[in-house]
Amino acid sequence: MADTHPLLRLLEAWGAPSSAERYRIVAEVTSEDFYYADPHSGPLTDRAAFIGFLNTFKTRLPDGRIEPAGPVDQHETHARVAFILSRDAGPVREGLYVADLAADNTVNRLVGFLE
């Protein structure tokens, strides 16, 4: 999926079945100095901390995933996408991710807001 927006690819990391797959996705689509924050975590100031966060998420919610609730809206190097936190039983929460993209089109900063 080389033509998939890096923000959508990053959302796939929440549902990836293994730590190695989560690591691969994050390494492919984030910048070296990646920053993440949401109401339940952060700020996380590097990839390693973010991957640890994703691994904890999968431990606590093995069937959990983050899915886009619409297309990515991008303005220059800023992007946003509505999302749904889902489990096998269905949707749990909705929210919005706002991202900054680096010059190489990787996600440099991701901030989440919950509804």
Image: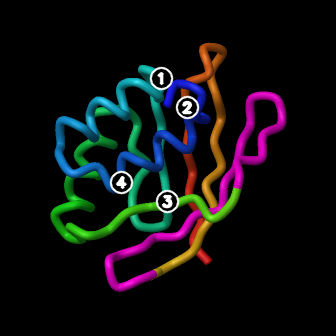
Number of numbered discs on residues: 4
Q: On the rendered structure, is 103 left or right of 112? A: right
Mark 3 or mark 1: name the one nearer the start of the chain: 1
Given the image, on which type of amino acid does mark 3 rest?
Answer: Asp
In the rendered structure, find residue 107 and report the number of the disc placed on it.
2
| Structural distance between the alpha carbons of marks 1 and 2 | 6 Å
| Structural distance between the alpha carbons of marks 2 and 3 | 15 Å
Secondary structure of the residue carrying numbered label 3 = strand
In the image, which is nearer the foreground, mark 4 or mark 2? 4
Image quarter (top left, top right, bottom left or bottom right) of the C terminus: bottom right
| Structural distance between the alpha carbons of marks 3 and 4 | 14 Å
Residue under label 4: 14
- Residue 50 in percent (x, y) is at 33, 43
Residue under label 1: 31
97 lies above or below 105: below
Mark 2 or mark 3: name the one nearer the start of the chain: 3
Given the image, on which type of amino acid does mark 2 rest?
Answer: Val
